[in-house]
Amino acid sequence: MHVPDGFLDVPTSIATGVVAAGVVAVSLRRARDELAESTAAAPMAGLVAAFVFAVQMLNFPVGVGTSGHLMGGALAAVLVGPWTAIICLAVVVTLQALLFADGGVSALGSNVFLIGIVTVVVGYAVARGLMAVLPKRPASAVPAAAVGALVSVPATALVFVGLYAVGGAAELDLGQLTGFMLTWHVLIGIGEAVITGLTVGAVVATRPDLVRLTRGYRTALVLTDADGTSREVAAAPVADGVRRIGTGWVAAALGVCLVLAGLVSSFASANPDGLEYVAGEVGFLETARDSVVAGSPFGDYAVAGIDNPVLATGLAGVLGVAIALAVGVLIARAVRPRATGETARDTEKV
């Protein structure tokens, strides 16, 4: 749901940009507590930014002539916390707009607001609410994250409709716009839920201490008695993030990002995403303007001078993953307070 230049008028774009900048500024301060919990927090922030960038390149078909892609707000919030997630998504959306011409430059604030803030707030709120009623174990984060992701997509679509009602470039039947946006983005939300659930499930299975939503929850052990009867007992709570992330785990996670962005992305659906499709059906697609960086060497996830589209898309994807990872880690390290005294000794534990 990357909004191009021209869909929203200048005052609305400026207003959403101011709100987005304010929320990101607050997030940079509030993320200190999330990032201070673990020496693994900064690398995780970079990996989350890199993964969201990679998966956003993978448009999946959701209907005849339509596609969708992960927005990633719920996923990021469940893994690294809501404040850090907003920073990660802001990095991804800004990188996409300025380097790859994905989303308008004048609409950058709107895209950060929609993709980087609304999805995080809604997705995390739903996931936290479900964790309060689900069994108190790390595995509960999987369905909680999936449902949060599912709800966040149509919720964000409704927020876009609200923005369009205030400052849309064309006069439309808002009822029709709402119906189209909800219909297609509920379907896209199902894809978002599947991707989010699978990703959170993989992390919970390998390193539950890296999933911030599971902090304090107990893992479950299944013991088999001598008579063959199985019983479940609670083990120790998930650690509060004091373990190092480990080079092997980082290498595996980064390898997944590079394969997705560098190889799988070339086989993504070429159909327009939900917002673009709805714009064409409802009648405001012609108000879109090309991005001012559309002619950049990496515009539209390609590389100037390389005619092979698979190679060009792959190289652009690898570049994007590398930049998202580096910027995410650098910002997280800059924001994270220095550990001192007893805290420093605790975070040095492996």
Image: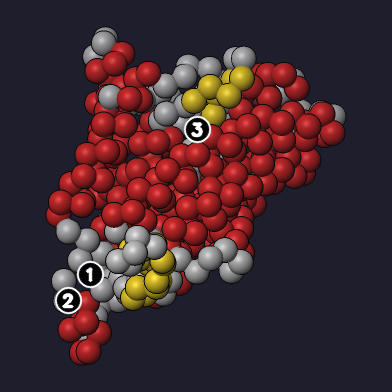
Mark 1 neighbour density, 10 Å: few (under 14) some (14–19) many (20 or more): some
Q: Judge by depth and name the residue closer to the eye, 268 or 101.
A: 268
Q: Quadrant of the C terminus?
A: bottom left
Residue pointed to by mark 1:
243
Marking on residue 31: none
Identify the residue at horizontal 35%, vertical 25% (top origin): 265
Amino acid at dot 1: Arg
Marking on residue 69: 3
Per the image, label 2 sits on a secondary structure element best described as loop
CB within 8 Å, label 3 to label 2: no
The location of residue 319, given as percent across then percent down, is: 25, 34
The location of residue 87, given as percent across then percent down, is: 42, 57
Amino acid at dot 2: Lys
CB within 8 Å, label 2 to label 1: yes
Amino acid at dot 3: His
Residue pointed to by mark 2:
349
View extreme (top): residue: 307
The reply to whether residue 212 is in sight is no
Q: How far apart are the two marked residues, 2 and 1, measured between alpha carbons?
A: 6 Å
